[in-house]
Image: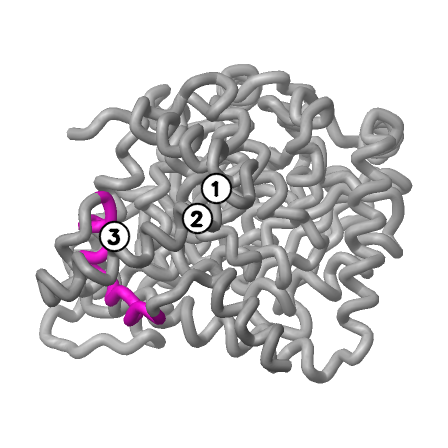
Amino acid sequence: MPNTNTEFKYKAREALKDEQLQQALVGVKQGLVNNRLDAIKVVPEFESFRNDAAAVKQHVLENLDLYLEEFEENAISSGAIVHWAKTAEDARQIILDICKQNNAKNIIKGKSMVSEEIRLNEALKNNGLDVVETDLGEYIVQLADEPPSHIIMPCIHKTLSQITQLFRKNHTDIHKADKNYSVADIVNEAREVMRRKFLSADIGIIGANFLIAETGSIVLVTNEGNGDLCSCLPKTQIITTSIEKVLPTLDDASLLLKVLARSATGQQITSYNTLLTGPKQDNDKDGPEEMHIVLVDNGRSKMLKTELREMLRCIRCGACLNHCPVYGSVGGHAYNSVYPGPMGSILSPAIEGLEKYYDLPNACTLNGRCESVCPVKIPLTKILRHLRNEQFKKRLNNKSTRFSLKLWSFFATRPKLYHRFNSLFINALNIYINILNRCSAIPVFSSWLKSRDFAPSQQKTFQQIWQSRKEND
């Protein structure tokens, strides 16, 4: 097994060979991208929404302590219990203590990337608790004993055939082995299993899309309604969320909801948009008797002091993943992180260290497509370039890479020498290709050319071609 610094390259190569994965990823490349385009076409002011959403999120980051204090005060006033977790370990321990105090045995969960980040399921299972994911995608990857491969569509890497096989193996009492299953059959079978879990749960754990400072409320966005059932059926509710999710007002949440669904799945609005404020009150017909809100930092306060701070504007829509040619080719598991794609290439090194996730900032062509669709206008390519600079400063690159970069810098800062060298290189390349009659054997580039065709040489450098056209105009 490769070491951490080369794991992305290893897993990416394996992903490119996986025919079923490549088949499943077509849905990302076509469906989600086209759905987003259709959704924003009918909203002429969408670009204005993006500008306003980015401004709101940036304002929050600049005043994060004030809004968190306001949220805590109003959440407590509504009857919720607020917990602060500096690290992932703190968050896990807080939740385990709540489970112990309530003598809990059965836990149901709604989809929460923060709970994935703090590795909550593993901790709960290691302490003897039965944990079931109720989001269909999360439930499928739980049965497969795999992490999610996409932040909004956790099992997008699975084909219908693979899911049917999983259900056949795990639902022996209700699965019809002789039937050709459709998507509707999968959903109905999962629903039948989930109903039992919902009714027997002691604690429900969910995430939060937004926190509202002015009311102490939680905004939960889902398409299946499972989050609502996790919230209102168990006696005890736990909400795991990160500190940057806070917004000043309900009006701000309304604005963010306008860009979230359109950017994520191409919907005008998600099926369920739920506002939760405190536990069950005397005149409420349902709801939890206890509401615990666990606010997780896990490195975010440190990010605020760095060039990575703008990444905290992220609203977890997944648009950057959907439009990323690298993600679309290798899927989410190649990143070996909770957060894949462009967002993960920044968040993972920021949270767990650049040394651990050395490869991820380089898993990008810097084409800028992710940045152009981000609903809160995060300068993703700028931040990725910053991380690459940090790699060089910390001497995390291998010797050959550092030598190549220094050589490039030497020529690039000396224009006349650079142009002369380029001319010599082009001439040598033309001779080399003519002799071998193929491009794949070019030294240094041979790995790159295994899966790509080298463009035919134009016999001149870019600068020479540009100068010639300029003179002819």
287 or 7: which is nearer to us?
7
Residue 207 part of the magenta-drawn span: no
Magenta part of the chain: 444-458
Cα separation, mark 2 vs mark 3, equals 25 Å
- Using the image, tell me which numbered label, if any, was put on residue 420: 2
Q: Is residue 100 left or right of residue 148?
A: right
Which residue does the image show at 17% across and 62% down from the upper left?
433
The answer to whether residue 107 of the structure is visible from this angle is yes
Q: Amino acid at mark 3?
A: Trp
- Residue that carries the numbered disc 3 in the rendered image: 448
- Residue that carries the numbered disc 1 in the rendered image: 417
Q: Can you tell which quarter of the image residue 449 is in? A: bottom left
Q: Amino acid at mark 2?
A: Arg
Q: Amino acid at mark 1?
A: Leu
Which residue does the image show at 65% across and 40% down from the upper left?
311
Alpha-carbon neighbours of circle 3 within 10 Å: few (<14), some, or many (≥20)?
Answer: few
Q: Decide: marks 1, 2 in contact (CB < 8 A)?
A: yes
